[in-house]
Amino acid sequence: MTSPAGRHRDPPTTRTEKTLKSPRRTDPRRPDAAPDDPLPRPRPGTGPPAPVALVTGASAGIGAAFAARLAANGHDLVLVARSDQRLRDTATTLTRQHGVAVEVLGADLATAEGQRRVAHRLAEPTRVQAPVDLLINNAGSASAPDFADTDPTVLRAALELNVAAVLELTRAALPGMLARGHGAILNVSSVNAFLTLPGGAATYGANKTYVTALTKAIALTLTGSRVQIMALCPGPTRTDFHTHNGTREGVSPAWLSHSPEWVVERALADLHRGRTVSIPGLTTKLIALAGPHMPLPVTAFAVRRTRARRARSADPMRPRPGRCRGGRRWGR
């Protein structure tokens, strides 16, 4: 079209074209980023170097799923866990499959020395060690017995791993990310943060409540920066977490639990959307919404029923509460 003055005018841009041209959903440091991919793979030989992600508890479960997904997206990795040999096997597999650089850092994050070792890697990268762009605080543990029956050293170790390590590593990573003008931290919490449960879940839920609250508070201080922090609060997940810790709380119906790969996909999508708290799954969201408002007597009743059902599954001859073996009610 030509205007009366003879100058050429471009046709009006449609709303669809504006959406496709908008750079808001792409990473400004990654010009090749696809709008619908939370963590797209960089083009070989072009653009900035591959981003680096540090994943704790990377030898199994959700941590291993994070490592595999990020490697598939072209991230170089720093994998942290106690099992050094298992980490090396994982690193070899990921390098062979995806061609990424994988650094192995064996450390027990339940100890002050292990926390200092990983914090030093986050705070002071060298010329050989690239700075970390994405920190995944995933390592965690739970205790099996009731609170009064648990060894105090076990409780202290769980507190160090679930709380102190998250605090220490988050504090170590943030200054460098703020100075570089980009970065993200993902703290793996739990839906137990919204619930009040007994047994081994008592201290575990309290630990995760701290992680979620700390993450939300730090997110407020990061407002206006290009550094993001998010708490991931998954529900029951099909991993060996409860088997490894010897807990029974992880026994959940199949329809309520999710695979670690599914949880990781939802978490990275929520991180890309800029959310502060990620709760994957509709049922898990409903649990998190109702949990803080659940009266303690109702929770206690549900816990008693659950424990009785588990006891009967372990001993089929065990009578139901309030009934004799013949099925008649016991006299009061």
Image (spheres, rainbow, N blue to C red):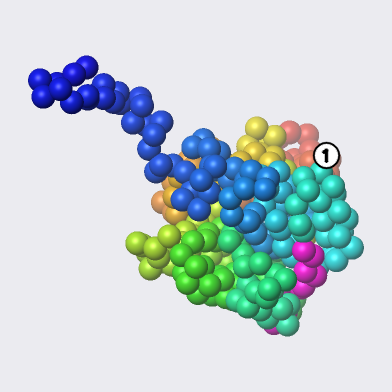
Image quadrant in which you'd find residue 316: top right
Q: Is residue 322 above or below residue 218?
A: above
In this view, the residue in front, 284 or 292, is 284
Q: Amino acid at mark 1?
A: Pro
In this view, the residue in front, 151 or 73, is 73
- Measuring from the top left, give residue 298's x and y in whole percent: 49, 49
Classify residue 180 as left or right of residue 263.
Answer: left
- Measuring from the top left, give residue 3's x and y in whole percent: 14, 21
Q: Magenta residues? A: 103-112
Q: Residue furthest front?
A: 6
Residue at image location 80% in from the left, 70% down from the top: 106
- Mark yes or no: residue 160 visible: no
Q: Is residue 54 above or below residue 238?
A: below
Q: How many marks?
A: 1
Classify residue 83 as left or right of residue 304.
Answer: right
Residue at image location 53% in from the left, 72% down from the top: 176
Image quadrant in which you'd find residue 76: bottom right
- Residue to which mark 1 is pinned: 316
Helix, strand or loop at label 1? It is: loop
Q: Residue furthest left?
A: 4
- Measuring from the top left, give residue 133's x and y in whole percent: 58, 61
In this view, the residue in front, 266 or 172, is 172
Q: Callout 1: 10 Å neighbours few (<14), some, many (20+)?
A: few
- Mark yes or no: residue 316 visible: yes
Residue at image location 49% in from the left, 48% down from the top: 27
In this view, the residue in front, 203 or 33, is 33
- Measuring from the top left, give residue 165's x and y in whole percent: 63, 73
